[in-house]
């Protein structure tokens, strides 16, 4: 990944929710914005045609400390996040998305949450904006 590429938005979501993440990415681009989406990164493209659950289970069995593929995913996604203005987290999400949200907040990025958060969570105050739906968010950009 070219670390010099700039993005308006970084879209984070769960691999198992990939269809919705890709659709949100497409809709943001349709409004004329640039988007980094982990699902479109070189490291993910070949996995898109795979069964979602099996692909995720295969990834989860890798040695996260030493596997070169895991390192590639990390490096590409962190570069995309650092080079984006706004972090968008589309629920439902997993651990990685929450870590990415913390990174974005620490980098001073504007953080946006899409999806209902039912229980109180004080750390969700890192999100300067929250929307119940993708359509609600898209009307604001």
Image (spheres, rainbow, N blue to C red):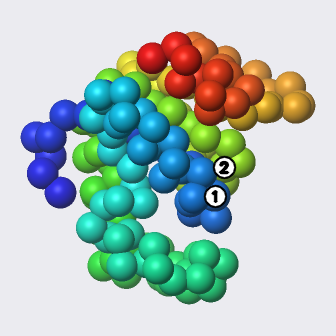
Q: Earlier in the sequence, mark 2 or mark 1?
A: 1
**Camera-nearest residue between 27 and 94:** 27
| Quadrant that contains the C terminus | top left
Q: Residue at x 42, y 44 (%)?
A: 26
Q: Residue at x 57, y 37 (%)?
A: 89
Q: Quadrant of residue 65?
A: bottom left
Which residue is disc 1 drawn over? Answer: 17
- Relative image position of residue 88 (x, y in whole percent): 51, 33
**Camera-nearest residue between 59 and 63:** 59
State how many labels appear. 2
Q: Residue at x 62, y 32 (%)?
A: 134
Which residue is disc 2 drawn over? Answer: 93
Disc 2 packing (10 Å; few <14; some 14–19; many ≥20):
some
Q: Residue at x 29, y 28 (%)?
A: 32
| Quadrant that contains the N terminus | bottom left
Task: Give how far apart the Cα atoms at labels 2 and 1 are.
Answer: 8 Å
- Relative image position of residue 123 (x, y in whole percent): 69, 26
- Relative image position of residue 90 (x, y in whole percent): 61, 40
């Amino acid at each position: 990944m070219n670390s010099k590429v700039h993005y308006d938005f970084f879209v984070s979501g769960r691999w198992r929710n990939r269809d919705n993440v890709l659709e949100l990415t497409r809709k943001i681009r349709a409004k004329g914005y640039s988007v980094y989406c982990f699902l479109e990164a070189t490291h993910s493209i070949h996995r898109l045609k795979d069964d979602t659950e099996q692909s995720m289970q295969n990834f989860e069995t890798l040695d996260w400390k030493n596997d070169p593929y895991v390192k590639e995913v990390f490096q590409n996604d962190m570069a995309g996040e650092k080079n984006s203005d706004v972090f968008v987290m589309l629920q439902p999400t997993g651990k990685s998305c929450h870590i990415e949200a913390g990174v974005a907040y620490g980098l001073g990025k504007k953080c946006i949450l899409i999806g209902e958060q039912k229980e109180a969570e004080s750390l969700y105050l890192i999100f300067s904006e929250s929307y119940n739906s993708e359509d609600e968010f898209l009307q604001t950009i």
